[in-house]
Image (spheres, grey):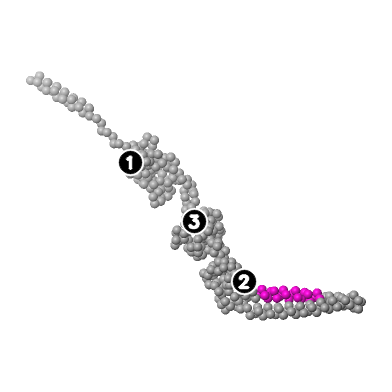
Amino acid sequence: MLGRMGKLAAGMIVASLGLVLSGCSEEAPTPPPPRMVRTIVVEEKPLVLSAEGAGTIQARYVNNIGFLVSGRVLTRNVDVGASVKTGDLLASLDPVDYNSRLTAAQSQVTSAQAALDQAAGEESRFKQLLANGFTPQARYDQALKDLQTAQAGVVGAKANLKLAQDQLGYTKLHAPTEGVVTQTGANVGQVVQAGEMVVQLSSFNDRDGVFSISVIYIAAAKVGMPVKVWMQAKPNVSVQGVVREISPNADPVTGTYTVKVTLTDPPADMFIGAVVVGEVSTAGREVVTVPSSAILQTGDTPQVWLVSADDTVKRVPVKVDRFNTDTVTISSGIAKGDRIVTAGVNALNDGQKVTVQKADAQ
């Protein structure tokens, strides 16, 4: 009886050992294959700073044109918006008074010439008498003085005649240059003084884009800075310009600074008064720009997955300078040459093995 029980126990032990040995012979589970990820190699590029502002087209040269004499406006031949050419008649004054002055000046010339003819005859006669000894020297000297006075009288009368002729001509106001009438200062029947603005004429050949810039951006504006200018109503109509003038003082009402941009060969569509948009772009410091999908936001600090040399990934905190629609500008945390993951950032773990897509491997 005891012998059979011993044999049974021995058999059970052998069976148990067989089971243990059988379990030890099973293979360990296969680890998951490396996860395939899309990556980019970090590059540093200058940060492009751009700013836009609305403005208007204005003439670079604006002339306030007025009469050189006073009088009552008889006609005004142009209105605001009229295009004029050099020599076109803009306005005229009533010439009655100036015609009278011209007639009086012509009479003075005639009178002075008659006095000169008489004095010349007297001087010639007394000169002959003096030579023959029939008149004293003092009498001839008086005749010579009368001749010189008459000659001066003729010169003065002719000068007054020229002045009267010029003043009569000044009653007609002609365009000194071609341009566009942007303002008028007198109407028919109004009495104007010499030099008072009657017509404001803006040159159409030289045009500026004039912008009002806030104090936030004015420090970055420099004379000579290139500016792209296009029409607000027609964005496809554009032209290049250069900052020509920056106002040193802010407008007391708006607090903005006036910046004038000289346009290079502006098209006819950019007429005086047209509303335009100006854009300035400048290169700033070197920064890293990555797709927004590369950012992992699990806490207060944004992070990216950095692919190490052994094809494992690790989290790296970064400092974001600016968020754009599709990209993120990073100022620190990664450097040129680093490879970071750009897709599936929420499905990775620290130290996980990854496989870089072939298209991204170079």
- Tell me if residue 151 is in the magenta stretch: yes
Depth check: give the residue in front, 110 or 43: 110
Looking at the picture, does residue 235 appear above or below residue 86?
above
Amino acid type of the residue tagged 1 in the rendering: Leu
Residue 352: x and y in percent read: 33, 37
Which residue matches tag 1?
Answer: 348
Farthest left residue?
A: 1
Q: Tag 1 or tag 3, which sits nearer the N-term?
A: 3
Say which quarter of the image contains residue 41.
Answer: top left
Over which residues does the magenta segment extend?
A: 147-167
Instruction: Give yes or no for contact between labels 3 and 1 (Cβ–Cβ under 8 Å).
Output: no
Q: Is residue 45 visible?
A: yes
The quadrant of the picture occupied by the N terminus is top left
Q: Which residue has dot 3 on it?
A: 228
Residue at 36%, 46% in the rendered image: 293
Quickly name the residue at label 2: 195
Residue 207 percent coordinates (x, y): 54, 61
